[in-house]
Image (tube, rainbow, N blue to C red):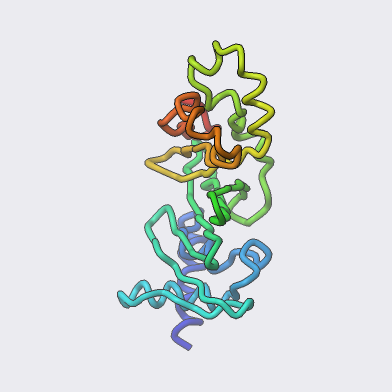
Amino acid sequence: MKRTVTIIMMALAVMKAGAADLRTLFINMPDSIMPALTRSDRMDFLDYMDSGMKAKARNKLGGESEMTLYQDNMLSVKTSQSGRLDIVLFPRKKGSDLICIIKTVTARYDDSSLSFYNEDWTPVDGKTLIELPRFDDYLTKEALKSDSLDVFRKMSMLRLQSVTAVDGALEFRYTSLDYIGEDAERYKTWLKSEPLRYIWNGKRFRRK
């Protein structure tokens, strides 16, 4: 009963304010985005966080999931031993917030994918919001001037990148250098040590 009243109050607050908060969005998120956990699991996570307890739940795959972060505009859930899902809100200049979903597989190296939604959870085409980094964007001047660059490109065909949300921006890192084998150490100076940073301007993400 208490939970039902809470949901009704949140819905009324959304209607009044014209924009949903992250708590409401997370509860109403389609199950298809995080299929291993139910709506009830998501509500339990928030209840646990409110109580200062560890927010853990048994997922549908028989493993354990845990909400590791909850803030006004961002939350993070460790969905499995090798998976993480982040939800980040980016304010638009006009209208409701943009929802950014970052799904990261943390196997040997992190590999992230992005998807975007309106507050009613209708998808937004990512191509209208960001031009994702190309492999060459990660390369240093040393690499770009080298006669061996084409060889390095072929050796680095498996190109994974991780994405994190930091201070109103998305940061991209190249994560799969070691996949090329014993020559990886030789090419470390060919890749930028700092992440590629994309700033949100209210309409699009722009490379800084």
* View extreme (bottom): residue: 1
Farthest residue toward the left? Answer: 52
Q: Nearer the viewer, residue 86 or 152?
A: 152
Please name the residue shown 58% across and 48% down the image.
111
Placement of 21 over or under 53, stated as above or below: above
Q: Is residue 99 in view from this perspective?
A: no
Front one among 157 and 30: 157
Position of residue 142 in the picture relative to residue 52 (left or right)? right
Quadrant of the drawing holding the C terminus: top left
The residue positioned 68% from the left and 49% from the top of the image is: 123
In this rendered view, identify the residue nearer to me: 82 or 52: 82
Q: Report x, y in % for residue 194.
A: 41, 31
Picture quadrant of residue 137: top right
- Location of residue 155 with respect to 114 vertically, above or below: above
Identify which residue is drawn at 46% across, 38% down.
171
Position of 171 relative to 100 (above/below): above
Q: Residue furthest front?
A: 182
At horizontal 56% and vertical 56% (from top left) the residue drawn is 107
